[in-house]
Image: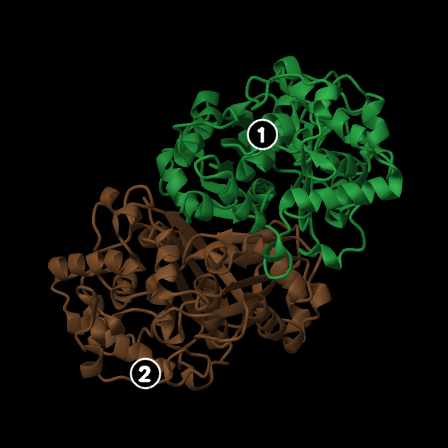
Chain colours: A brown, B green
Amino acid sequence: MPLNNTNIVSGAQTKFGALKGISLREMFAEAVDKATADAGIPKEDIQAAFIGTFIPEMLVHQGHTAPLLLDFAGLKGIPATRHEAACASGATALRAGIMAIESGLYDTVLVAGAEKMTSVSTNKVTEALAAAADDDFESAVGLTFPGVFGMAAVAHMDKYGTTEEDMARVAVKAHKNGAKNPLAQFQKEITLEKAMTPRYIAWPLKLFDCSPISDGAAALVLTSNEKAKEYTDLPVKIVGTGQASASMNLCDRDQLASFEASVKASRAAYEMAGLSPKDMDFAVVHDCFTIAEIIASEDIGFFEPGTGAKAVEDGITAMDGDKPINPMGGLKAVGHPVGATGVKQAVVIYRELIGDAGANQIPKHDVGLMHNFGGTGATCVVNIMRRSDA
Amino acid sequence: MPLNNTNIVSGAQTKFGALKGISLREMFAEAVDKATADAGIPKEDIQAAFIGTFIPEMLVHQGHTAPLLLDFAGLKGIPATRHEAACASGATALRAGIMAIESGLYDTVLVAGAEKMTSVSTNKVTEALAAAADDDFESAVGLTFPGVFGMAAVAHMDKYGTTEEDMARVAVKAHKNGAKNPLAQFQKEITLEKAMTPRYIAWPLKLFDCSPISDGAAALVLTSNEKAKEYTDLPVKIVGTGQASASMNLCDRDQLASFEASVKASRAAYEMAGLSPKDMDFAVVHDCFTIAEIIASEDIGFFEPGTGAKAVEDGITAMDGDKPINPMGGLKAVGHPVGATGVKQAVVIYRELIGDAGANQIPKHDVGLMHNFGGTGATCVVNIMRRSDA
């Protein structure tokens, strides 16, 4: 049965990038202000908050982030909880917000995410990110995230003949879309030749196959059907949600050319929404690495396994293609402040659906899917959203 | 309107203590096994999991704990999210479980919490715990948690004339109850004279005013009314839940002799349940320090402000008193593995309510209240539970 009471009535993000001189709490407050007061939603209407942060403990020595951030954003007092699932932290906060509305406990809630990553060294960030994999069995022996997705790339290349050039094309598309997006970390197109620059990070992944280290925050306001009318004539309905887990360690997986949590979460979301991949106008998927976008586009059922790379080459996933993917630039070009990412993905869907995506607006935008992925793929959340008049 | 569809049908904890040679995932699996398979609830029935851990990133270099722990506990695949609110992490996971059931998205869910704290030095634990306070403004200048609650004690002493002996009596009661509890870290009674041993940790708090550093895990199974009958003839209903926040930093508080988040959260829970303090048979409150129990007993409305210490002295909060508080020993005697604590509190309420508390069974046990408190009191969760036949 489709969800029938959860509406997005506002969504905003800060600029993503290396935001020198802006702290975690300041970025968070900026995103909240944009999504509430600036959007005509009084902060007094927010009854509870669900917040995604991945690892502020190691990046800025701060736990218990929910009440801290909320206070600084002018929302002190209301229930506020932090949700963490590595790179899927933002989407798990969103799911908590959905359940809060659907349960009837709250009418109007804030869902927000933030991460401050550039205040420590790259080595420290790499160490922090490694905590998202199985520390006892894999991270501790040296497996970092470029290594994990390098292995996924090798598996996909081996099974389907995917090439380094196929992956580079994902980067070219991401930068093309990001170049139009004033909130993106990289607002510059790159050529296929540049994307193929052989500066390997973890073979076969090169520099341009990797999303960057970023600061940023994003926020959404969710509300019930009854309240939605007070805020906008054009709410976006969340009609399906799915979440699934897989083993943390890769050694327990059947394969690396597909992520089982993505397959399960998307099937659960489609089933709840009563929709199928062909009903989706576009998707925002978790392209932490270029190969991750290719695999995700197959796992969510947009393309048959092994055909995701061809879809990119044929322009099907471009902004003007039949199935645009990451039309505003994805993690690759917009940046990946980990806790913010899942919320930002929902903001992108919201803006595209209501026709507010500016130069990144895609032509057909009634129904969209977001796919947010944590760690080695041990968590995946998929949400399906439809414009209320569609 | 009282909650009307959330039932606890099972609850269990591991022994708490310095559990040498047992890892985070092993403790977690033990608690889950006890609350599911050992209680006659097939693991296959669990549809989603909500997990409280505070700071495994700094204690065991492990983030993304939900899928990791779930996999090891034999529950791989289902949606699993980690919830963090410092020492209230467990109770925020429980609230997420409540909303999951009340939303109708799931029928049967696991709520669990765990923390492994004794694998690093005490200094490292102190540093990790300090991340639960405001790092930019207070922790970084040296305010640790004994300091925070030392200040609360001074405020309460100043305002109400509370004495060090008053606080010591809370420790004596905790150890008396804990001595009967085979799962407690400290199973030994202490005299008032011993509790008054002048080994100050942060004046006026002495060693016996402080809860210990602990390892441990706890788990609950929640289910809908319809499913509850399949598992037990005597489910416990969660009839009210409240959560509130306050400023993280103490400098923004009006006072330290009461915690506003506790007052707000308990009033919200009473209102939802349609009950008042006089309807409560007993409470499990967050006694991270002895003064915290005295203040909590006032904040939840059991006693007028300033009279909590007298209630202890008069035996009102003893196991055989009119309003037993922490009848199994509290954080002080049972231990405080941070992420597990809020879940363990609910396990204690569940066991007392169904008459399964062994030597710690209190005589009147129809309705109980749990109070779980995070950090400097920036988060508080209060839940009210009633035995289904009461």
In the foreground, B206 or B341: B206
Is A254 on the left-hand or right-hand side of A387?
left
Q: Is residue B338 above or below residue B21?
A: below
Indicate the amino acid at tag 2.
Lys
x, y (%) of residue B138?
A: 64, 57
The chain ID associated with circle 2 is: A
Indicate the amino acid at tag 1.
Gly
Q: Secondary structure at mark 1?
A: loop
In the foreground, A154 or B341: B341
Q: Quadrant of residue B163?
A: top right
Judged from this view, the residue extending furthest toward the top is B359
Q: Quadrant of residue A29?
A: bottom right
How many residues crowd mark 2 within 10 Å: few (<14), some (14–19), many (20+)? many
Is A218 on the left-hand or right-hand side of B293?
left
Q: Is residue A257 above or below residue A194?
A: above
Q: Is residue B87 above or below residue B385?
A: below
> What residue sits right under mark 1 in the picture?
B335
How many residues crowd mark 1 within 10 Å: few (<14), some (14–19), many (20+)? many
In the foreground, B214 or B216: B214
Q: Is residue B130 visible?
A: yes
Looking at the picture, do discs 1 and 2 lie on one chain?
no
Q: Residue at x 44, y 60 (%)?
A: A383
Q: Which mark is residue A124?
A: none
Q: Which mark is residue A176?
A: 2
Q: Secondary structure at mark 2?
A: helix
x, y (%) of residue A252?
A: 25, 42
Q: Is residue A387 visible?
A: no
Is B96 on the left-hand or right-hand side of B166?
left
x, y (%) of residue A203?
A: 17, 64
